[in-house]
């Protein structure tokens, strides 16, 4: 028979790794999209003198391709940063509740941890659900059959 303490450690590692990966993914997307927005503004400033010179020369056929280059960079990347932040906070809450679930209120805390993970997946989208799935599975299994931890 497998030792309960080892099962508890594996469960903790699985939940922490799953939720930590989801938080990392959720926090990197706004940072990267912010970088793309910054690059778009820099390229817009670099292209402006050439656009002005071409306009003075009477050549306007360059305007559409230059506008597509500048306008196409990072235009739809920063959709919902508040949702990503809320999902990351829910992942952290889920991990904290799972780690603190002991004693008489353990079932309620494990239920709260699973609910927070489900809400984080809903806010984060399908890709975040896939990252959260191992941790959520462990939380639900521990909710059904709690592991005694010291």
Image: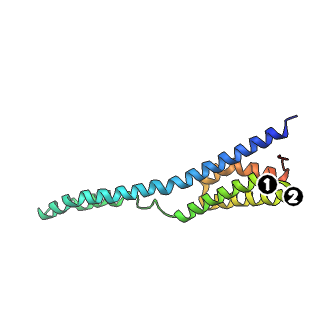
Residue 132 x, y percent position in the rendering: 66, 51
Q: Residues within 10 Å of mark 1 (few under 14, many from 20)?
A: many
The numbered disc on residue 13 is none
Q: Name the residue at 46% across, 59% down.
A: 77
Residue 19 x, y percent position in the rendering: 65, 51
Residue 92 x, y percent position in the rendering: 65, 56
Looking at the picture, the colour scheme in use is rainbow
> Element type at marker 2?
helix
Taking 1 as reference, is 70 above or below it?
Answer: below
Horizontal side of 92 relative to 137 (left or right) equals left
Q: Which residue is mark 1?
A: 101
Taking 22 as reference, is 56 above or below it?
Answer: below
Between residue 103 and residue 61, name the one nearer to us. 103
Q: CA distance from mark 1 to mark 2?
A: 9 Å
Horizontal side of 111 relative to 39 (left or right) equals right
The numbered disc on residue 104 is 2
Q: Name the residue at 54% across, 55% down.
A: 27
């Amino acid at each position: 028979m497998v030792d309960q303490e080892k099962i508890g450690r594996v469960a903790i590692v699985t939940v922490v790794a799953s939720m930590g990966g989801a938080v990392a993914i959720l926090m990197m997307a706004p940072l990267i999209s912010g970088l793309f927005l910054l690059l778009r503004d820099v390229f817009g400033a670099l292209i402006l003198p050439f656009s002005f010179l071409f306009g003075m020369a009477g050549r306007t056929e360059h305007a559409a391709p230059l506008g597509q280059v500048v306008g196409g960079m990072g235009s739809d990347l920063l959709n919902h940063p508040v949702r990503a932040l809320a999902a990351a906070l829910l992942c952290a809450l889920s991990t904290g509740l799972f780690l603190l679930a002991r004693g008489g209120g353990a079932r309620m805390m494990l239920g709260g941890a699973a609910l927070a993970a489900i809400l984080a997946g809903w806010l984060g989208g399908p890709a975040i659900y896939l990252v959260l799935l191992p941790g959520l599975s462990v939380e639900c299994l521990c909710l059904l059959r709690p592991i005694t931890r010291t």
